[in-house]
Amino acid sequence: MDLIKSHHHLTLSVGGAQEDYDFHTGLLGLRSVKKTILFDGITPIYHLYYGNYTGDPSTLITCFAFRQAGIKGKKGSGQIRIVNLSVPSASLEFWADRLQQFGHEYERFERFGEQGLHFEHPCGIEYEFIADDSDQREAYVNGDIPAEAAIRGLRGITVSVKELEQQGWFMENAFGARRTAQDGNFTRYEIGTGGAGHIIDHVEEPDVPQGSWIFGEGTVHHCAFDVVGQDQQQQFKDHIEGLGFTDASDEKDRQYFHSVYFRTPGGALFEAAYSTEQGFTIDESVENFGRDFQLPSWFEDRRQEILDTLETIDY
């Protein structure tokens, strides 16, 4: 199986919208790519997108701001635990100073022979900067963070599982990933060409209680992987259903991409996604990405009602 090409986006359930916006565009220096709402359910919830200048797949982090709904998630096993970001090795000291400047505690670590900094989103989700000089993706530069230090994109994710056997079988036989490294209770899988934007690490934590699978502040909801097109998405869905993983969702129209969701044996929710031809330019030009609040056509008649419900964000 070679249908899964790379990361597409990672989606988190965070706290306040302003807090999240300041964290991603301020501290991290990512671009605001899109401001819209969660398309599922009946309660308006912000869906905020961040990435590089053009919002390319594998640079995208998207966030549901759930504090206004008063719903909190429970962190634990069976979830994506850590957001891994790729930065040049020479920039680690810059980021250590910047984290301290913004009042964020951090810890230095080495894993798989790689140097990094571990810190947290204000809502408690774990993040890591990982030094990677081979990552040639184009970073977004906002004038505050120098180009030589800017985040290149998602390097990967770290999934917490109670045990790896069934999850590992899925990664290799259903997902088409390669097991490439081991470091203590951490196991690395890679997809596509491998390297930054293609990494799915797993950590075995048998004594950690099961985390929640609902939308809820403080947890990673899912990770999406790029399958490039509709035919490939259907082929992948057919493949995993043929292996017995029959709880994959129907294809869902997310305006900017199309999604099929599926629960992995270890518990983490994954998604097979492909961008539409217009992508994020369907409702605003590249130059104006993230400037205005966007709604799909089927919500447009509720615009003022939705805006009255949502927290006001100071851009």
Image: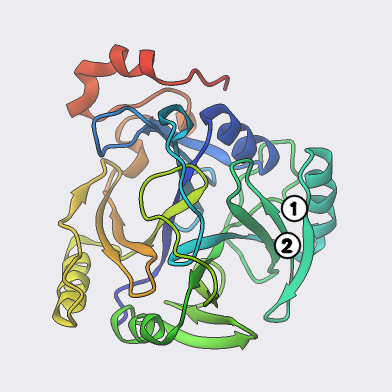
Give whichever of 49, 287 is nearer the camera: 49
Residue corresponding to mark 2: 88
**Given the image, on which type of amino acid does mark 1 rest?**
Ala
Residue in the picture at 26% in, 40% down: 255
As drawn, is 112 to the left or to the right of 309? right
Residue corresponding to mark 1: 149
Tags 1 and 2 in contact by the CB under 8 Å rule?
A: yes
How far apart, in angstroms, are the residues tagged by discs 1 and 2? 6 Å
Quarter-wise, where is residue 245 in the image? bottom left
Give whichever of 21, 34 is nearer the camera: 21
Residue in the picture at 23% in, 17% down: 302
Mark 2: secondary structure: loop
Residue 76 visible, this angle? yes
* Local crowd size for mark 1, using a 10 Å CA cut-off: few (<14), some (14–19), many (≥20): some
As drawn, is 166 to the left or to the right of 13? left
**Given the image, on which type of amino acid does mark 2 rest?**
Pro
Residue in the picture at 30% in, 66% down: 263
Mark 1: secondary structure: loop
Q: Quadrant of the C terminus?
A: top right
Residue in the picture at 27% in, 37% down: 39
What scheme was used to colour the molecule? rainbow
Give whichever of 62, 143 is nearer the camera: 62
Vertical position of residue 311 compared to residue 267: above or below: above
